[in-house]
Amino acid sequence: MSENNVINEVNNKQPHLSENFVKIIARDELSHSYLFNGESGVGKLALALFITMGIFCPNRNNGYPCGKCNECRRITEQQHPDVVIIKPDGQSIKVDQVRYLKDEFSKSGLEGNKKVFIIQSAEKMTSGAANSLLKFIEEPGNNIFSFLLTTNMNLILPTIISRTQVIKFPNLDSGSFEEELSKLGIRNSQLYLVNKLTNSTEVVKKWQDDDWLSKMQNSIGVWFDLIVKNDAEAFVTIQSNIIPLVIDKNHREPIINMMIAAFEDVLNYKYLKADQFSFPNNEKNIKTLASNISSITLVRVLELILGCNKQLSINVSFQNILESITLQIMNLLDQ
Ligand SMILES: [Zn+2]
């Protein structure tokens, strides 16, 4: 293991991409503008810093930065005077921020110094900022390199995309993703569920606000247990336990997907004798239901819940949707 954090991060998260860039640097074939597209947490900033070290490091060896010299250290700590990193100021990247960057760079361009700029969350550039940047990346000057980082390329102006080389970052392999999740405080009992619901650490970060994820996992677990016991209280838990946790619209889909995950636990145990559960605390009732339910009924239950995602787009209250499927599932299980 290197003692340099950035090098460790790219080696862990994006070994293939970093290997490719090392070769490109060694051949002196680096493009001037890159657009890094990928989920948050996949190592976009780390790779941009790694390449930047490759540009500046005086001890570079076959494209590899040393990771230890003054240049490498300052880049790692994001303190290098010729490496400017811009991120959203509030909700957006404003035209003033891009202007500042252009001023900085036009000064140094004259002196012939190398300069790198990195724009994080580039999709958050206002159109003014994006247009201002456009002229700049068109004729960057020989010693200027730019990296635009984004989680959503659909929100980037096509005129910007066409002037950059786009690098698509693969999602982390499950081991590295789980490492990221545990850094965010995801417990082992939640890993299997979270892996099913998302591959974005940004999304998980939001779910950790106010412990939302474990509260919701508990509430769905309670709901599921009551359904298995054919207890009509299941209907009541929608209003009392689940709806209060729907703080914004983004919470609706994961709730439905958690309900699906609970019944997939039943399916996986019934047919595969799987020993990993999205709802490990409900293992007993998962197994009970798996041995009592017919495969036709189980498929119907899953279809019912899957149908909810479609209903979200029409104008029905979320509470009504969940109450209605609760009744329908209980009817099915009762037969
Ligand atoms: Zn170095």
Image (cartoon, rainbow, N blue to C red):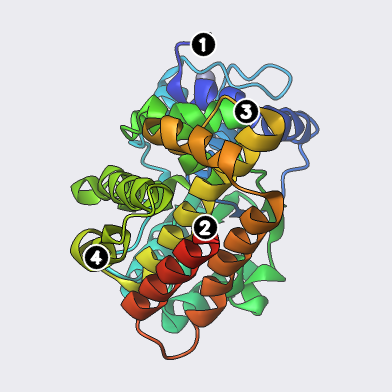
Q: Say if mark 4 contacts mark 1, CB within 8 Å.
A: no
Query: Which of the two labelled residues, at mark 1 and mark 2, occupies the earlier sequence position?
Result: 1
Q: Which residue lies under the disc numbered 4?
A: 236
Q: Earlier in the sequence, mark 3 or mark 1?
A: 1
**Tag 3: amino acid:** Ala
Q: Is residue 212 above or below residue 124?
A: above
Residue 274 badge: 3
Q: Check residue 333 in the rendering and tell me which mark sits there, or answer none.
A: 2
Sequence-first disc among 4 and 3: 4
Nearer to us of marks 2 and 4 is 2
Q: Nearer the viewer, mark 3 or mark 1?
A: 3
Cα gap from disc 1 to disc 2, whole angstroms: 57 Å
The residue mark sitting in front, 4 or 3, is 4
Q: Secondary structure at mark 3?
A: loop
Specify which label sits upstream in the sequence, 2 or 4: 4
Name the residue: 46% across, 14% down: 68
Q: Nearer the viewer, residue 94 or 264?
A: 264
Asked if the residue under mark 1 is in contact with the one under mark 3, i.e. CB atoms within 8 Å, the reply is no
Whole-angstrom CA distance, mark 4 to mark 1, is 55 Å
SS at badge 1: loop
Q: Quadrant of the C terminus?
A: bottom right
Mark 3 vs mark 2, foreground winner is: 2
> For the point 73% across and 31% down, which residue is it?
16
Which amino acid type corresponds to the residue marked 1 in the rendered image? Answer: Ser
Asked if residue 254 lies left or right of residue 159, the reply is left
Closer to us: 311 or 33:
311
Query: Mark 4 and mark 2 in contact (Cβ < 8 Å)?
Result: no
User: How would you rate the neighbour count of disc 3 (Cα within 10 Å): few for under 14, some for 14-19, many for 20 or more?
Assistant: few
Mark 1 neighbour class, 10 Å CA radius: few under 14, some 14 to 19, many 20 or more: few
Q: Position of residue 322 (x, y in %)?
A: 39, 71
Instruction: Look at mark 1 in the image and give the residue it sits on.
Output: 2
Q: Earlier in the sequence, mark 3 or mark 2?
A: 3
